[in-house]
Structures are given as C-alpha cells and as structure tokens.
Image (cartoon, rainbow, N blue to C red):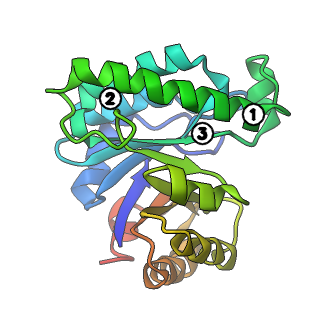
Amino acid sequence: MRLGATLAHLSEAPPFAVAEWARRLVDAGFESLWTPQIIGRGSLVPDPFVTVAVAATATEGVEVGTATVQVPLHHPADLAHRILSLMSVCGDRLTLGISPGSTAADYATVDRDHAARFRTFDQNVARLRVLLAHGRDEFADLAPAAGATGGPPLLLGSWGANVERAAREFDGWLASGYRRTADQIIAAHDRYRAAGGQRAIVCAVRLSGPDDLGPIGEQLHRFAEAGFDDAVVLIEPGGPDPETVRALLP
C-alpha cells in the first residue's frame, strides 16, 4: 500500500506554507499529495486548485490530487475549465477526487442547495465528463495518461450505495477516514471490491499528536492487509513530524 499525505490541515492554526510543506512531505517519502475543498467552516483551508498547482510546481514525480472537490458547488463549465487549466500545470500527475459533499455550511456559504446535492452532482458530473473529453484533445501532449473520462482519473468520494457506484462508474474510490471507524472503512472496502472496483484510497487518516502514532500505525497496517491501494494521512499542526509518520508504513 502506498502512503500519501494531505497538504492542508483542519485545525484553527494558519494554513501550511504549501510549497515548503509539499517538498518536506516528498523528501520524507510520501508518494502522493492531496487536498480537500472546504469553505465556510471557520478556519481557512486554501483553494484546492491553487494548492495542487503550487505543490505540483514545487515537487517532481509525485502524484497530486483533490480529496475531494465538491462538484455541486461549481458550475460544470467553470469546473472543467479549472481542471483543464490544472492539467496544463500537472500533466499526468493529476488525480481528481470528486464528491457530492456532505457539510451544509459549505453549501450555505455559496448559496447552493444542500438538499439537492446528489441530484446536482449527477447532472454536473455528466456534463463535466463531456466538457473534459472535448477539452482533453487540446491538452493531449500535456496529459498523456488521462483517465477513462477523457481528463484526469476521476475518483468518487462517497458512502452508502455510492460505494458500489464508484466501482461501476469511476476510476476509483476515496474513503474518508475522518469520521469513520477502521471497521466501517474495511467493510465498505469489501463491498467496493465485490462490485469490481479498481483503485481504493482511504484518506484523511488524522494525526494530531504523538499519542496517535501507535493507533494510526495499527490502522494503516489493517488497511494494507484489507487490500487498499493507498492511504493518505492528515498531519495536524503539533502532530508528529512527517518522517516519523512515514516510518509507520515502511
């Protein structure tokens, strides 16, 4: 199982300096760099497109991605434009995790209908795929390893029946470890694999202090044994240093 890390944190502290933090994570041996889209929940979590672009230019060779972009918060044409623009910076290093979102505060901040998020997600993703396929032709030399959508690989971050949907309709599945237990995550992973799912990533595995090292180390090994392809840790300010966290999964 590969080990990645999150470029943002979810505490009240100022954001990480993205370029410096990205280089440190890569130097520590992390194999992918990810960031979420969060808006309207108090502390600043920098824009995911800006964050990924900075990380891509500050590092070489490592995968960069979103976990996740909340699709219903965007007009699909604007979102496609931003993704295609990001492809011109990242090339085939880019992976897009997308989701319907879950937190009402994010929707209220941009005057979107939280209750309609699943319907809006379906509508917008259908249009997004068409726009990315059309725009992909213009970026053929910049992103030679685009996914089945015609743009970068699209991974679905969601739960419930959407776990099987991720297996059927997307290039992979993102399981959030932020509010779920390891048992819940592994059980959902079994369903995903049974439905024929490809890449499976457990993300936002949070470490807020040194006392988390033992329990999180055990979780990471459980995820590896269960068959996850990747795990992505979220190191909070004041948490263990990246080198120590990376050593949890040699």
Q: Position of residue 201 (x, y in %)?
A: 47, 62
Q: Looking at numbered disc 3 in the image, what kind of residue is underneath it? A: Ala
Q: Earlier in the sequence, mark 2 or mark 3?
A: 3
Mark carried by residue 180? none
- Outermost residue to the right: 115
Give the residue number, with chain letter if any, for mark 3. Answer: 13
Whether residue 50 is visible to the viewer of this picture, yes or no, is no
CA separation in Å, label 2 and label 3:
20 Å
Q: Earlier in the sequence, mark 1 or mark 3?
A: 3
Q: Looking at numbered disc 1 in the image, what kind of residue is underneath it? A: Arg
196 vs 159, nearest the viewer: 196
Give the residue number, with chain letter if any, for mark 2. Answer: 54
- Outermost residue to the left: 141
Q: Where is residue 191 in the image (x, y as percent from the top left)?
A: 61, 73
Whether residue 167 is visible to the viewer of this picture, yes or no, is yes
Position above or below: 123 against 101 = above
Q: Position of residue 199 (x, y in %)?
A: 41, 62
The C terminus appears in which quarter of the rendering?
Answer: bottom left
Position above or below: 98 against 162 = above
Q: Which of marks 1 and 2 is nearer the N terminus?
A: 2
Looking at the rendered structure, the secondary structure element under dot 3 is loop
Give the residue number, with chain letter if any, for mark 1. Answer: 119
CA separation in Å, label 1 and label 3:
35 Å
Mark closer to the observer (2, 3): 2
Looking at the rendered structure, the secondary structure element under dot 2 is helix
Answer left or right for 152 relative to 7. left
Answer left or right for 83 relative to 76. left
